[in-house]
Amino acid sequence: MIQFGMRCHDLCPKMEMEKLFEEIKANDIHQVQLAFKKSVSNYDFSTGHYSAGFGRYIASWLEKNDIHVAVLGCYINPTHPVEAKRQEEVARFIEHLKYARAMGADMVGTETGRLDPDMKVVPDTRTEGAYQLLLKSFRQIVAAAEKLGVIVGVEGVFDHTLYSPAMMKRFLEDIDSPNVEVILDPVNLIHPEEVDCQADVIGKAFAYYGDKITMLHMKDFVFEGRSQKYRHVGEGLFQYEPLMKLVKEKKPYITMLMENSSKDRFKQDTQFLQDVYDRVEV
């Protein structure tokens, strides 16, 4: 059995928070990834506006609509090369940790950025200097997360600082915290050269840090040159059976959050994944 959910900004356009939660309930969705800036139009979530009362207010609306925030999205660039901007990104993430605690979210999630102020794909992202900058950011973030008792969800991407299972393994060992877990987006780990050996890539992720994988993002993909383009599940190149075997064996009841789905596609997409899960044998 899988717990399915989706990103709020895939479900509906940006709107008033109270209406957003009612819309989610109306579509019979109970697990979400919520990114305030992408989905909520009537509150200021810039750094410094958090209060415990506001956090409880959000929590009350979530409870009223039977919604659980599996991931509170705060996708920052922790390797921003401009120091003042990097510190702003870190501060924003730390404030989201406070929201997560008040809301009962499973984690606050982010990808790991690129060594470019505009998040462009640049070769320097793979350098040791970029990796050390990433560690600097996350040591600040994790220190706050440990004090608050909140989980940090980290997502690797093939053209970001943590670009492979081996790099994620190194990062987890260097950070060495029970408050850091992995959001596994298997599509995001597939390099253009690895389309034919993607099962090995996903196998390495589970072998290296399977105990830390506690959330899944699901979509499909094709490559146009070296550019990855997203597709609905079952309409691209991703091979679902090897992943589902590992999930069935090691991570039953894990939450799978649909990406690039829609209110019209959600049931179809989740049924496709459930069917794969049901038929694989472990």
Image (spheres, rainbow, N blue to C red):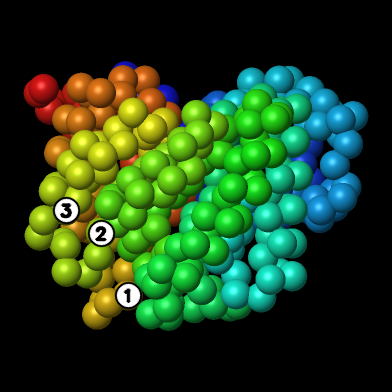
Which amino acid is tagged 1? Ser
Q: Which quarter of the figure is the C terminus placed in?
A: top left
Give coordinates of residue 121: x percent, y percent. Answer: 43, 77
Marks 1, 3: nearer the viewer:
3
Q: Nearer the viewer, residue 58 or 236?
A: 58
Q: Nearer the viewer, residue 236 or 71?
A: 71
Marks 2, 1: nearer the viewer:
2
Give coordinates of residue 74: x percent, y percent. Answer: 63, 50
Which amino acid is tagged 3? Gln
Q: Which residue is mark 3?
A: 198
- Dot 3 falls on a residue whose secondary structure is helix
Q: Nearer the viewer, residue 22 or 32?
A: 32
In primary-sequence order, the first of circles 2 and 1 is: 2
Residue 73 in view in this figure: no
The disc placed on residue 190 is 2
Give coordinates of residue 179: x percent, y percent. Answer: 54, 32
Which amino acid is tagged 2? Ile
Residue 166 in view in this figure: yes
Q: Which residue is mark 1?
A: 227
Residue at 17 percent across and 30 percent down: it is: 245
In screen coordinates, is 22 left or right of 42?
A: left
Snapshot quadrant of residue 25: top right
Q: Are marks 2 and 1 in contact (CB under 8 Å)?
A: no
- Dot 1 falls on a residue whose secondary structure is strand
Snapshot quadrant of residue 144: top right
Give coordinates of residue 137: x percent, y percent. Answer: 60, 55
